[in-house]
Image (tube, helix red, strand yellow):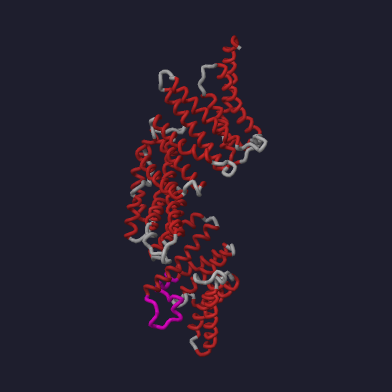
Amino acid sequence: SRKDPETEPYRSKYSARALLQEVKQQLSAAEDCGEAPLLAVRRAVLEYELGVNHTDTEELSAGEEHLQRCTQLLEPHRLSRDCVSLYIQAQNNLGILWSERDEIKTAQTYLESAEALYNQYMKEDGNPPLDPSEHFMAEEEKLTDQERSKRFEKAYTHTLYYLAQVYQHLEMIEKAAQYCHTTLKRQLEYCGYYPVEWALNAATLSQYYLSKQCFMESRHCLAAASVIFSQAGQVPSTEDNETEQDQQDLRQRKAEIARCWIKYCLNLLQSYALSFQDNIGELDPDRQLELKAQRKKEEDEKENGRKKAVLFGTSDICDSVLAMEEKVSSVYPLDFQEAREIFLVGQNYVQEAKEFFQVDGYVTDHIEIVQDHSALFKVLAFFEEDYERRCKMHKRRIDMLEPIYADLNPQYYLLISRQLQFELADTYYEMMDLKVAIGNRLEELDLHTIKKINSLAQLAIKYYELFLDSLRNPDKVFPEELEEDVLRPAMVAKFHIARLYGKLITSDSKKQLENMQTSLEYYTFLVDYCEKHPDAVRAVETELELSKEMVGLLPTRMERLRAKLCPFI
């Protein structure tokens, strides 16, 4: 069919159909003088081939009729060695056919029926059954038991593969992942896979395990994906010469797997950073010691469970996968050094992904990778106890994000533009807090530190204001009610701006009073908004509580300052 002309894409399919119809007629003529059961099976084979032929040419109704006839002919003998493989393949194809009609529940029925039949046959008989192709072969051409078994297991692997997709459509995510894992394992076991496709499916499955915080399983899938993908360059192409497009596709797939590794490293660091946090988001030393004591016990238990887990591949592949796994941990880091090792692996994959997803041609992908790189620095900074070094890590984030933001047209990339505005504001805010903490350790604040604190605060305010301005309508009016997806970021931006004006250091009392007034206005906005829109309260409970407190305290402080200024005003 690959050689069919573009004007007649199904020419060879139609020729094959004509031959099948001819054989079917000859078979009907021979029915009176032959063995009925054998002829019935042969008719079923022809109906099956005609069904597949019609579905291949997008004639689904005719395809369904032929496949249904096939299963009806086989029904009484479906558990026999002659029929079971053909029956399962017919059920598989009916499942695919109904999936293409978006009748997923019907597809599920056929595929689960095929799965049940395989299990029943293996339990009651278990011998390699005949392959459908053998029904028209001479005795000396028949397949070996080994080949029969291989083809039968391949048919069943297809059943599981299609069931995984059906469960995904039905949002039975856990079951879909389980079937996907089993399919991948069987494909390796029976050597029935294309390296690139297999690797991408394994990398995708890793992201499911990541969402469940099953880091050992996620790493195993990614390590297997990387090992199997490396085979892609060793497999000869079906064409004589690989095209430039083929090479481009390979580079893209490699970069996609690299992005899955980035997410793995990032999630591993982030999830355990949360475990360490105290109530103000800092590293909790007591919690750190407690987790260190727990980890040895958990590692032993995991290692024992590991041996019972579903591992991929033959011994050769397993050795390569295990070697790949050893390059990065799957247990939470307990200090900066351990966190840094995971960070460095993630950073290497950032470089690998960026080689393909360059800003020229892949704007969104490139920015997402840079954002992940920034997030890696952010979470690594959490483990760093030295405030100056932590500040430098945040500066690295600024250096990678600001140039991208400067080149971005918000008219076309509004959502990404907002994300970058908010992240830049948050990063400057974090740096300002660190500089204040460093300053508090000094006997007296020097002029350089004061300038630095003020500069960082002003830059944080600038980016928070840019974010808030992006929410305004064309008439520059701020919305009376915020959309749910921007509610919390907008309220946090208002709260942080209020706090930042309170952190600005000035010896000018009049300027200090102006800053306090601005700060009060932002705190008041948050309190008033939540009074008008009570549903917003749950999104900003902590910020609202502190804002109410400041709305109560600031007017008194401002009165005191005004009293001091009174002789001069």
Residue 298 image offset from top left, x and y in percent: 36, 45
Find the residue positioned furthest to the bottom: 33
Find the residue positioned furthest to the right: 475
Residue 529 image offset from top left, x and y in percent: 63, 32
Name the image quarter holding residue 510.
top right
Residue 21 within the segment the image draws in magenta: no
337 is higher (above) or lower (below) than 254: above
412 is higher (above) or lower (below) than 506: below
The number of numbered discs placed on residues in the rendered structure image is: 0
Residue 264 image offset from top left, x and y in percent: 43, 47
Which residue is painted at 51% across and 46% down in the image?
Answer: 363
User: Visible in this render: residue 511?
Assistant: yes
Relative depth, front residue between 73 and 373: 373
User: Visible in this render: residue 311?
Assistant: no
Q: Quadrant of the C terminus?
A: top right
Which residue is painted at 34% across and 61% down in the image?
Answer: 314
Residue 128 within the segment the image draws in magenta: yes
Residue 23 image offset from top left, x and y in percent: 52, 83
204 is higher (above) or lower (below) than 454: below
Relative depth, front residue between 58 and 103: 58
Which residue is painted at 48% across and 34% down in the image?
Answer: 427
Residue range in magenta is 121-144
Relative depth, front residue between 284 and 336: 336
Name the image quarter holding residue 250.
bottom left
